[in-house]
Amino acid sequence: MAEFALVLPVLLLLVAGMLLAGFYAFRAAAADWGIFVLGVTGGSYPIPADAQARPSVAWQDVRQGITVDLDASSRQARSRISIQEARPWLFGIRRAEAQRGRGVFRLWRFYPGPPDPGGVE
C-alpha cells in the first residue's frame, strides 16, 4: 500500500495529461476540419453552402473563428482560422489557447450548386 500511495499522484498526473492532450488534439482536428470543409464548399458551391457546412465543425468558437474568402478572378477559395484566447480554469490558472491555420483551394465548379435531391446525376 505504501508503494501505491507513492505512485498514485504520478499516475493521476499522467492520466490528467493524457486527457488534456486528447482534448487539445480534438480541438486542433476540429479546426483543421473546419478549414478544409469550408474551403472546399466555398470553392465548390455558392456561398449558401457555407451555412450548411459550418455546423459540421464541433466547437462553436472554432466554428465562428473560420472565415472564407472567394476570389473568382484567380479561381481560389481561401479559408482561415485565428483563435487566441485565455480563459480562467482550475485553481486560478488561466488556460491559453491559440489556433491558427489557412487553406487555399482551387475552385472546381462543374455545376452551379449541389445536385437536386430528386434528380439523378
Image: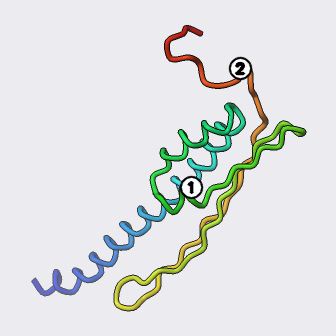
Residue 79, position in %: x, y? Answer: 70, 50
Residue 119, relative to residue 110: is it above or below? above
Return the residue at label 1: 31
Q: Nearer the viewer, residue 15 or 64?
A: 64
State the SS at label 2: loop
* Residue at (31% x, 70% y) in the render: 15
Disc 2/disc 1 C-alpha distance (Å): 28 Å
What SS does tag 1 mark?
Answer: helix
Instruction: From the viewer's perspective, tell me whether residue 81 is left or right of residue 54.
Output: right
- Say whether residue 30 is left or right of residue 36: left
Work out whether mark 2 precedes mark 1 in sequence or the reverse, and give the earlier one: 1
Query: In which image quadrant can residue 38 be found?
Result: top right
Residue, disc 2: 111
Say what amino acid the circle numbered 2 marks: Tyr
Q: Residue at x 30, y 80 (%)?
A: 10
Quadrant holding the N terminus: bottom left
